[in-house]
Image (cartoon, grey):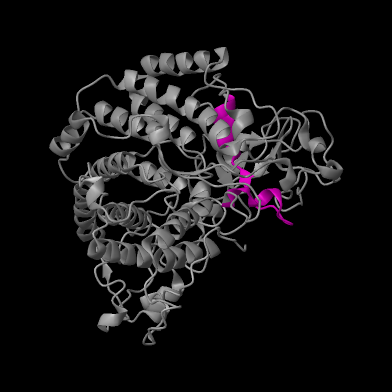
Amino acid sequence: MTRKLKYIIPVVLLFATACKKQLDINTDPNNPSEIAVSKLLPLVEKELGHSLATGEGLSQILGVYTHQLSTREDPDQYGSTGNDFNIQTAWTSMYGNVLANTDVIIRQATADGNSYYAGIGKVIKAYAFSQFVDAFGDVPFSEFNKLLEGNANPKFDKGADIYPELIKLLDAAVVDFATSANSNVLKPGTDDVIYNGTIAKWRKAAKTIKLKLLVQQRLIKDVSTDVNALITENDLISTTNESFLLPYGPNGATDDRNPGFADYYASQRGQHISPWFFEILKGKNSKIYTGITDPRIPYYFFNQLKPTETPESSQPTEYRDLGFVSIYFGSVGADRDRTQQNNATLIGIYPVGGRYDDGGGKAAGTGGKITAADATGAAPYRFITYADKLYLEAELMKVGLVTGDAKAKLDAAMKESFKQVDYVITTYVKPAQTVPAVASTAATTKYIADVLAQYDAKPTQQLESIMTQKWISSFGSSVDQYTDYRRTGFPVLFNPKDATMAPGGQVQPPLPQKPVPVQLNRNFPLTLPWYTNELEVNTSAPAQKDPATFKPFWLP
C-alpha cells in the first residue's frame, strides 16, 4: 500500500542495521544537514500510528491473535512469520522513521533549548519502545542508531533492561514539560498532530504511559507504591479529549485516511470480523454476556448485505447471521476461500472511519457496491484513551494493588467507552451519512446495567469482565489487547481445540448453515517473531525465536 504524507521530509535517515555506508553530509545551505524539529515531529507521529495500526502495522496481525479479526492469511492459526508484511512494515517504520527521528528531535531540541520538543520526543520514544518490547520481547535499544559511532550491528537488549530506561525517559519528559514557555525558543503547535502543542496533555500522557508500564510488570514485581503514587497525584489522562491518539483525515489533497480503512477500496478484501467477537457482542456467546446485546454493533461492523439480501455471487458463505458475513479462525471448511468481496462484513465507522450500519447494505455505494467514497476513513488510531486508563485502574482495584471500588470504576470505564465512540465520530470521522449518538441511549444504559448485574452474579468472572470490556472498547488498537491477554488470560479467546467451543473439531454457524471444521496446529504465541531481514543483516542479532515459548520479561 502506498501512503502520501502531508508533510514531505527532505531527508533520508538510514536504519543502522540495514546500511553500513558512511553518510556524506551535504553542507550546502540550500540543503541543510539538520531538519527542523517542527518538520520531523509530524512524520514521527504519523509513522508511529502506521507502525501499530490495523492495515499496515502490528494490529493487523494482533487483531487476529486477539480474535477480533479473522483472515485467510498467515495470522490465521497464529502463523505469522518474520517475513510477514506487517512485521516488516512495523519494524522498518518504527526503527527507521520513528525512533531514528525521535533521537534527532531529542538531540536538536535539547541543544537549541526547546525542552517541549525534547519532552515530546522522549514520550514518543518511550511509548514506541514499550510497544515493541511488549510485542517482540528483546529488541535493539542501547546500541540502536549508533552507525556514526561505528556500530552497524546493534545487540538485542533484554526487555527487563529496557523498561527501566523507558520509565526514566518518561520522567525526564515530565521535567522538560515543567519548563516555562518563555524558556522555549520554539514551541510546538499545529505541527504536533497529536495534541497541537498542548503541553499539559503531553504531561498527562507521559504519566499514563508510565502507569501502563507499571501495571504491565505487576506479575513479577511489587508496583503498588508507584501506581498508588501516580493515581494519588491525579495528573493522568482524565477526559475524553486528553486521549493519546493519532488523528487521520479524509482523502483530499493528500491521502491521510486510517490504514485500516483500506479494505473499502481494496481490489481483494482481506479483513474479516471474527465470529467469536461478533457473537460476544450479539449476546450469543455461552461463556460471557449471554443474552446481552451490545449497542455498538452497527458502529463496529458494516454489513454489505441487508439482513434478507441474497449474496451477490452464487458461492455459499461460511458464516452468515442475517447481513453479517465472515469466516472462522482456523477454518478448513470448503467455503472459507470462496470470494465474498461484495458480501463480507467490513470494519465500521468505529474504529477505521468506515460506514455506520444503518441496515441499508451496500446499496448506498456506487453501482451497488461499497466504495471508499461511501465513508471518510478519518478515524484516529488510539494509543491510550481515557477509557483505557479507567480500565487500568479497575484492574488494579480488582487485584488489590490500589484501594477502590472496581465495579464503580468498570461502570465509569464502560460509560467512557461509549462516549468515546460518539467523540471519535463527531470530532474526527465527520461522516456524510446520519449517525445517531450511542452513549446516551436507553439501549446503552440497559447494556451497562446488565453487564454490571452479571459482574455481581459471577464473582469469579469479575476480572474477566473488566478485561473483556477493555478488549471490546479497544477494537482496532490490538497491541495492548495482546499484552492484556498475556498478562491476565482474558478475554477468553476462541480455541479450535476446546471441545466446548468446537465439539468434534467443528463449529456451527447460525442455522441452516452446515458445520465448519476448524483446527489449530500451533500454540498461542507469547511474542511475535523478529523481522527476518534484521536477523540476516545484523551480525549481533540472535537466531529466530520460537514465538510460542519466548516470553516477554513481565511474564513469570
Q: Quadrant of the N terminus?
A: bottom right
Q: Which sits in the foreground, 280 or 502?
A: 280
| Rendered position, 140 above or below 317 | below
Q: Is residue 260 magenta?
A: yes
Region of the chain picked out in magenta, as a range = 259-282
Q: Is residue 255 left or right of residue 523?
A: right
Across and down, in percent, residue 265 comes to 71, 52
Q: Is residue 41 magenta?
A: no
Across and down, in percent, residue 186 comes to 32, 55
Across and down, in percent, residue 237 comes to 33, 34
Q: Which sits in the foreground, 158 or 503?
A: 158
Q: Which sits in the foreground, 224 or 96?
A: 96
Q: Which residue is found at the position 51% from the left and 34% from the top?
A: 500
Res. 287 in view: no
Q: Which residue is found at the position 35% from the left and 31% from the top?
A: 391
Q: Which residue is found at the position 27% from the left and 73% from the top?
A: 155
Q: Which residue is found at the position 72% from the left and 53% from the top?
A: 337
